Structures are given as structure tokens and as C-alpha cells.
Image (cartoon, rainbow, N blue to C red):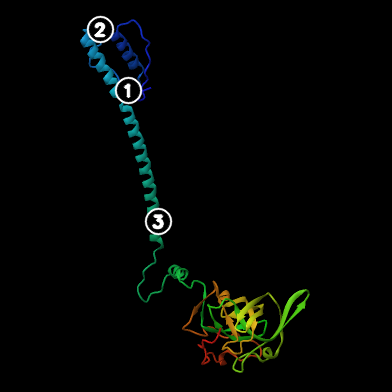
Amino acid sequence: MRNGCSWMAISPTPLNKNLSRLLMVTLLATQLTGCAALRSDQPQDSALQPLGREAFNQRIDELALSLESQCDTSPLLDSQQRQAQRMTADVREIGSLLRKLNDNVDNLTLAAPQIVPTGTQQPVAAELCSQENSPSGNKTLVGRSEWIGLPHLGTSLKARIDSGANTASLSATEITPFERDGEDWVRFKLALNDNDEVVESAQKEAFEAPVERRVKVLQATGEDSRPVISLLVILGPIRQHAEFTLNDRTHLNFPVLLGRRFLLDIALIDVAESYLHERPEFSGGTPADQTVNAPSSDMDTNDD
């Protein structure tokens, strides 16, 4: 096989060498299906005219060269066909990408916000889109300090909001661990300063709660183990449980510290504001409209 054309081997015979070459070329011409063809412009009986040796050899060489040259074009045709197929595939892919790009442009055009004159009401759809794209989303904005309600304790307390702290902390004293039904519990009282506002009954009452876990705190005086309890917290529209470590905070400015575990995914802090939400009211407490919200030491950095 040579370049897609079949070559048949011819055994040596006593025939004339020129006759053998003619027979070989004739057989090739009959087997080739697209490689070469004899010229049709010659008279059909021209091959029957007697030829001299030199003319005969020249004619045989011409036919052989013609067949070989035409057979050698088949790889070129195959290469061109493969290239055409690749180009067709590329064109189809580009067409698909252009259709997708056109769809994306249409979607962007539909989702583009509407421009309305100043002073006119913003369309409802555009308003909803603005809320969804807002950095705050559905999160509640809180100040650097807020009133929180603790329903389990029946009182509200001032809390410092600090994303730098991991957990929340509640000021407590007379912390006594005990066991109930095979589980660890703790008994404690609120540790408050004279200027801390609290429901009077909650200030004197001893509370009990199951211990969720214990945390170790490294201090200058050594290692301290603190119990952690879970309490429901009310802060504006937020109602969520938070884990509090119990420790005496009377040397600090706030009896409660709320850390980032409580704030995560539900609140954003505006450090320039404070007490953005009203104080939750409990029986026996001071009415919310009589609350003094901003102590002079609100920005004291000694708090933890």
C-alpha cells in the first residue's frame, strides 16, 4: 500500500520488460478508485497504435508518474478534510458561546435597576433588590453598647458589644457548682455595682442553671476554670440563646459582655452608636422611658 493506492506484486515472466510495466500500470489503473484516471480526451484506439521502444518507454513513464502524483494528493485531501471538520466544530462552538453571551446580556438588561426621578417613590422590586444587595442584609444593626433582656433571670442589663471577644460573659458571684440528676449544675447570684440598673428581685435572687461546659482562662495569678451556662437573650428584634461564662465583672464597666459567637450572622456593629434598641421591660423594673442609657465611662477601654 502506498499513499492510499494498492500496488500488486507481479512475478517475473519471460514477457518483454516494457510489456510487464504496461500490465502493472493497467492493473493499477483498474484498482484505483479515485487516485487517478486516464485522460478522456485521447482517442480510444490511440493505445492500439504501434509505438517504438523509446516512445513506448516514455509513455509508460508518463503514466506511472501521473498515477503516483495523483495518488500522493490523497493525504493532502484528507488533511484538508480534517481541517475543514475542525473549523466546522470551532464555528459551532463559537455560535454556542455567542448564544449564551446574548442570553446573559438579556438577563442583565432585565435585572438592571430602574432609574426614577428624584422625589418619586422607588419601585417595590428595586427596593427589594436594594435590600438584598445591602451589606447588612437581614442583620440587625447594634451599637457599641446595648440593653439586653435575660428572661430566665427576669431582668435587663447593660451589655458591651465586642466582636473581639469570642464568648459572652455575665457578672456573677457566689458561684457554687453542684450535681443534679447526675449532671453538673451551678448556683450563682448577679454581681453588680451600685450604678448598674437591674430589677431589684433579680439582684437578690440566687439562680441555678445546668453547666454546658467549662473554659480555662489564663491570668496573671494563674489558671482559672469558669462554668458556661446558656441563657436566652433579647436584643431589639433578636431573640437567641447565648453561652455565658460566669465570673465577677464588678471591676469593669458592664455586667455583660456579648462576643462574636452571639453576633455571628445576625448582627452588625456600629461603633459610633450606642443603645439603638429600647430596654426590654420586666416586672419590677424601671420603665424603659425612664432609663439612663449612656454612662460617662461607656468608652472605658478597661472592659474585657
Q: Which mark is residue 14?
A: none
- Mark 2 or mark 1, which has the lower sequence index? 1
**Residue on which disc 1 sits:** 35
Q: Quadrant of the C terminus?
A: bottom right
**Please, is residue 75 above or below residue 26 in the view?**
below
- Mark 2 or mark 3, which has the lower sequence index? 2
Rounded to the nearest angstrom, the CA distance separating label 3 from label 1 is: 51 Å
Instruction: State which quadrant residue 6 falls in.
Output: top left
Q: How many marks?
A: 3
Please tell me whether mark 2 sits on a helix, a strand or a loop: helix
Q: Residues within 10 Å of mark 3 (few under 14, many from 20)?
A: few
**Residue on which disc 3 sits:** 104
Please tell me whether mark 1 sits on a helix, a strand or a loop: loop
**Place of residue 91 in the rendered image (x, y in percent of width and height, measured from the top left):** 35, 43
Q: Amino acid at mark 3?
A: Asn
Please state if 290 lies on the left or on the right of 112 as rendered.
right
Q: Amino acid at mark 1?
A: Cys
Rounded to the nearest angstrom, the CA distance separating label 2 from label 1 is: 24 Å
Please state if 194 lies on the left or on the right of 91 as rendered.
right
| Residue in the image at 28% along x and 18% along y | 64
Nearest to viewer (mark 3 / mark 1): 1
Q: Residues within 10 Å of mark 1 (few under 14, many from 20)?
A: many
Residues at marks 2 and 1 touching, judged by CB atoms closer than 8 Å:
no
- Mark 3 or mark 1, which has the lower sequence index? 1
| Residue in the image at 77% along x and 77% along y | 180
Q: Is residue 195 visible?
A: yes
**Residue on which disc 2 sits:** 48
Rounded to the nearest angstrom, the CA distance separating label 2 from label 3 is: 74 Å
Please tell me whether mark 3 sits on a helix, a strand or a loop: helix
